[in-house]
Image (cartoon, helix red, strand yellow):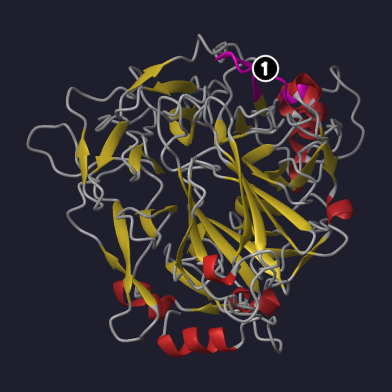
Amino acid sequence: MRILLIALALLAFSCSSKSSNPDAGTDPGDDDRPSAICHTGPMGSAPAFVNATEEAGFAALDAIGFYLTAADLDGDGYTDLIVKKNGTSQRDTQVVYHNVPHPTLRGKRAFEPWTGTGIDLNRREGVTGRAVSFHQAADVDNDGDLDIFAASYFQDDASDLLDRQEILLNDGTGRFSLIAGGSTVATPERPTNSAASFLDFDRDGKLDLFVADWYKTYGLSYEANQARLYRGLGDGTFTEVTSQAGLAEVADIGRRDSRKPAYGASACDLDGDGYPDLMKANYGRQWNDLYLNLGDGTFENIAESAHVDGDDNHDFHDNQMWLCWCKLHPNDCTLPAQPQIDCSQSGWSADDERPFRLNGNTWELLCADYDQDGDLDLLSLEVAHGWAGQSSDRTQILQNNGMRGRELTFARLSGEQSGVNRPRAGAFWNEGDIWAAWLDYDNDGLLDLLIHEGAYPENRLYLFRQQADRTFRDVALQNGLDLPNPGAAAVADFDLDGDLDLVTSVVPGKGTWTKGSLLYFRNQLGEHNNWIRIDLRGAGPPDGANRLGMGAWVKVTSGGRTQLWEVTGGDGRFGNQKELALTFGLGRVCDDVDIEVRWPNRSLTVQRFEKVRANYRIRLTEGSDKVEYLGI
């Protein structure tokens, strides 16, 4: 929404101007800030989102998607999309969509296929296309643009392992190339990558990479492959440091230190000490992992003591599969109740009474300071089934206690406590939460929750709006998001109008969907509240932060409220990634804002910027006091 008339209208409703109402103590002649802009809030009851799939070009392209990664590949400020068209590692299943000006609608954006990017390059002679399972974006060579980690996953029956994991370097225009000399992130065994996150775990200004893996053989064994940590060398190459970092796991199943099948990987500074911690969201109702960064290059798994491993309900006596086993083995147990499912099949197991099977099918562990107390809380996103009984975890918010180091713990809020609640009864329901995001969709200054419950026919999208008392209420249907069976998605301000939009896939074969169509929902509400969008530039090694500021903490204070975001490099499963620029909603408060940036450099430098204009896109550079205003 960059139309000149709109810009003039916004200025006409400004709270003040630099000439007529300068800040107290500021010489008007020295105030080079742009004019102040004030939004008075949304009027009426229009839905927050409008289905703009046709406008975006996806309808005409008959676009489909399965996994999505949001990244500004050419550095023009507009977020592009990397889309996997299905969930397999096959060639010709990826497409890049370039975010471009709409060809006919002034001020609108559209997506067009972007060919010739080189993102599908491989190292095989005479073969075109790349087999990839998902993508993650980060500036691994510190040249100011986003490079790509291309992950790989092959099942045990794969006749050809095709392409291994790779780093693809960006030339700054969205054109990619392979690194000479071969890949330094390719695993020697069959890859089963399911998630990845970039971070700077030692704060040397060079980004590192954490990669999580799935089952070795899904459905036949609990055994999974080892997650790996790679230290970045600053030129796009990496060296593996998994064992040195204390992250090596054992092949035996059922132990706290076993290799567990992960659906999500994430990194953020949970205890506030300046070092990013690592998390694995594990499947199969196995324990999650939280690796505390000790600051000396090593990690310690504190998931159990921090209450991140799973909830405290371990009662398996209403698990229908265990009940069938118990019914068929009367000499080994006392049947507490008759099963509600047919037990005539064979193969029932007593494993569902073992501690390592009494947790969650966790898909993501997502960081955000939702309660605005200055530390990062978590969303534990779960797939749950009625037949699995009460011991199977449901999606919960985990509230940070604010302590450092090994004293870090989280309080798990039940659905009744938080309002993120979908009451179910009996043994025949499925709650398929497969994707989520923290976002402030209406820019009121409170974080909301988008949860994609999509894996089963009766599932739908939920938009939980945060209330003043920190509880949540589902408002999806009245806000234009009446969507059955949503899949993976990307949240970003695609049109740079100050609020967050949504591109989502849907789950083919579920509900009414016959294919995984891509849908675009444009936000038309949040821009009417006040906001600020912040882009960071680090100084680079040896003493500065990585160039795009991954791992930085950004605090924005306005109207007596302080909000915190961390710039992260991968937030969950199969390429889930936020755009690096941070959008803060300010509600109806149009005061100037104060900003604090804690840079992830060796010294953990803190910079403060005062009296920054709201309702602008800005850039902050490490070591510079200048606020660069990029536009409205």
Q: Is residue 497 visible?
A: yes
Q: Which residues are magenta?
A: 291-304
Q: Quadrant of residue 70?
A: bottom left
Q: Is residue 618 above or below residue 403?
A: below
Residue with the mark numbered 1: 254
Mark 1 falls on what kind of element?
loop
386 to the left or right of 130: right
Q: Is residue 383 magenta?
A: no
Work out which residue is located at the far left of the displayed protein and give it.
Answer: 126
Question: Who is closer to the viewer here, 496 or 453?
Answer: 496
Q: Position of residue 366 (x, y in %)?
A: 64, 44
Q: Position of residue 125 (x, y in %)?
A: 9, 32
Q: Is residue 440 visible?
A: no
Residue type indicated by callout 1: Gly
Q: Position of residue 588 (x, y in %)?
A: 73, 75
| Residue at the spot 67% in from the left edge and 29% down from the top edge | 288
